């Protein structure tokens, strides 16, 4: 399967800065490490991967699916806040999948968590470890669940049949069910269904 | 001269340390043993299961297992986790031997384990906590000098449990439990004299010693 990955500029340069309880300012730079981590991950998951620049037009390339990861949310807690000895990091990624014609095939939210016990005087090393663990958690989820949650594999057979999608959306609306196409949430790994 | 200074250093560090009490227990379920080329990996139980074992403690046990008398081969934790990604991440690691059996049935997993020569996984659970503290100590400094006066003390408890899984048959071989309690004192009469109980370090050394005995012994309870 040929997959294109477009890393947006905001993802590549992601820096989170927060002032905790008006006392300490923490700066977390996920940017370059995060981008190279995702590029590596997709390189492992798919046979052929093209990495597109943020401003590159995807339609200039040939692929079965285009994946665009974004960071939707980033939160952390330090021992002062949690009243424990641990640093914790939560990262919420949004993975948008497009077919070869640029139609939005699905959107998948991946919620990742990392925690590290405080060691030493400062804590920046522990916070960094918690962030790395959260990124690894996301990578594990993507590796194990992406196909099941986004059905990206089906795009290898060709782009979406838009008439089918529109018909299904209309049917759902008539029956009064919310249209849930393309929206998925993570609740853990169901290994039995692997 | 050098021998004398070493002796003084050892004497002072022994004399100027707090007191530590220890209790160690083994519970064996299967016979164990380690052949040439077989190794052990030390892991922290997942924090998703409420475990808070410190990364420092894992490293300490790894180092202590790999040196001294009865040293055993230890594969660094990070190397093992990276080679088996994503199966030993906190979210995906098997929580019990039933999960281990399933995991060892996955393509590529037994091969990766064999290529590293890992025979046992030691899962550590537990932490070192400050359970109580008291006393008071104050320090002051002025143009003519400074000093401290008072007395402070604190007690740390290090409770750790190591579950040993044998990957050759995907069975739990048993558990080793250590419970160390240490009280440190800090009297100060102008100059503070710290009498520190190295509770966590002692718990690390004690656990590693018991694990070496447990793993190389082939007794069945």
Image: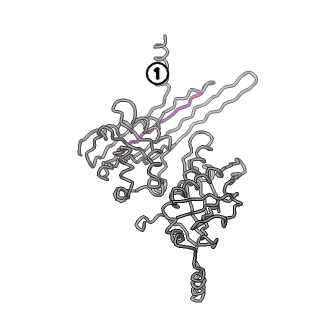
What is the x, y in percent for residue B104? 35, 55
> Is A119 rendered above or below residue A169?
above
> Is A79 rendered above or below residue A110?
above
Seen at 50% across and 25% down, the residue is: B16
What is the x, y in percent for residue B130? 52, 43
Q: Which residue is mark 1?
A: B10
| Residue at the limit of the structure toward the right, as seen here | B143
Q: Residues within 10 Å of mark 1 (few under 14, many from 20)?
A: few
Q: Tell me: A33 left or right of B56.
A: right
Instruction: Examine the structure image and report whether residue B17 is included in the region drawn in magenta.
Output: no
Q: How is the image coloured?
A: one colour
Instruction: Examine the structure image and report whether residue B182 is included in the region drawn in magenta.
Output: yes
Q: Nearer the viewer, residue B81 or B128?
A: B81
| Residue at the limit of the structure toward the left, as seen here | B220
Q: Chain of mark 1?
A: B
> Is B97 rendered above or below residue B8?
below
What is the x, y in percent for residue B98? 34, 59
> Is A153 rendered above or below residue B56?
below
Type of secondary structure dominating the magenta stretch: strand
Q: Tell me: B131 left or right of B137.
A: left
Seen at 56% across and 49% down, the residue is: A86
Over which residues does the magenta segment extend?
Answer: B176-190
């Amino acid at each position: 399967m040929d997959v294109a990955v477009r890393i947006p500029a905001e993802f590549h340069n992601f820096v989170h800065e927060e002032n905790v309880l008006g006392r300490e300012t923490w700066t977390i730079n996920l940017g370059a490490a995060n981008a190279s981590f995702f590029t590596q991950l997709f390189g492992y998951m798919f046979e052929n991967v093209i990495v597109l620049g943020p401003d590159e037009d995807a339609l200039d390339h040939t692929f079965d699916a285009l994946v665009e990861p974004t960071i939707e949310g980033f939160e952390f807690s330090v021992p002062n806040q949690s009243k424990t000895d641990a640093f914790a990091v939560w990262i919420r990624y949004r993975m948008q999948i497009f077919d070869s014609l640029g139609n939005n095939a699905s959107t998948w939210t991946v919620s990742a968590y990392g925690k590290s016990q405080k060691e030493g005087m400062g804590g920046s090393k522990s916070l960094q470890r918690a962030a790395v663990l959260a990124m690894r958690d996301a990578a594990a989820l993507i590796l194990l669940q992406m196909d099941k949650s986004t059905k990206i594999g089906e795009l290898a057979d060709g782009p979406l049949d838009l008439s089918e999608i529109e018909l299904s959306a209309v049917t759902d609306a008539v029956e009064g069910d919310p249209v849930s196409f393309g929206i998925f949430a993570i609740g853990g790994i169901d290994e039995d269904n692997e | 001269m050098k021998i004398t200074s070493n002796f003084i250093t050892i004497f002072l560090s022994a004399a100027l340390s707090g007191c530590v009490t220890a209790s160690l227990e083994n519970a064996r379920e299967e016979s164990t043993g380690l052949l040439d080329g077989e190794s052990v990996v030390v892991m922290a139980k997942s924090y998703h299961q409420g475990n808070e074992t410190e990364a420092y403690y894992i490293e300490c046990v790894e180092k202590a297992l790999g040196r001294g008398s009865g040293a055993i081969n230890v594969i660094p934790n990070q190397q093992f986790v990276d080679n088996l990604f994503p199966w030993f991440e906190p979210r995906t690691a098997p929580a019990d031997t039933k999960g281990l059996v399933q995991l060892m049935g996955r393509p590529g997993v037994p091969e990766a384990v064999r290529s590293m020569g890992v025979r046992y996984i030691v899962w550590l659970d537990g932490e070192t906590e400050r359970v109580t503290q008291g006393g008071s100590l104050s320090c002051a400094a002025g143009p003519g000098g400074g000093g401290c006066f008072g007395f402070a003390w604190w007690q740390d408890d290090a409770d750790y449990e190591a579950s040993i899984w044998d990957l050759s048959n995907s069975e739990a071989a048993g558990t080793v439990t250590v419970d160390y309690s240490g009280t440190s004192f800090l009297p100060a009469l102008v100059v503070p004299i710290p009498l520190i109980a190295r509770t966590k370090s002692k718990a690390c050394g004690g656990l590693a010693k018991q694990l070496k005995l447990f793993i190389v012994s082939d007794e069945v309870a």
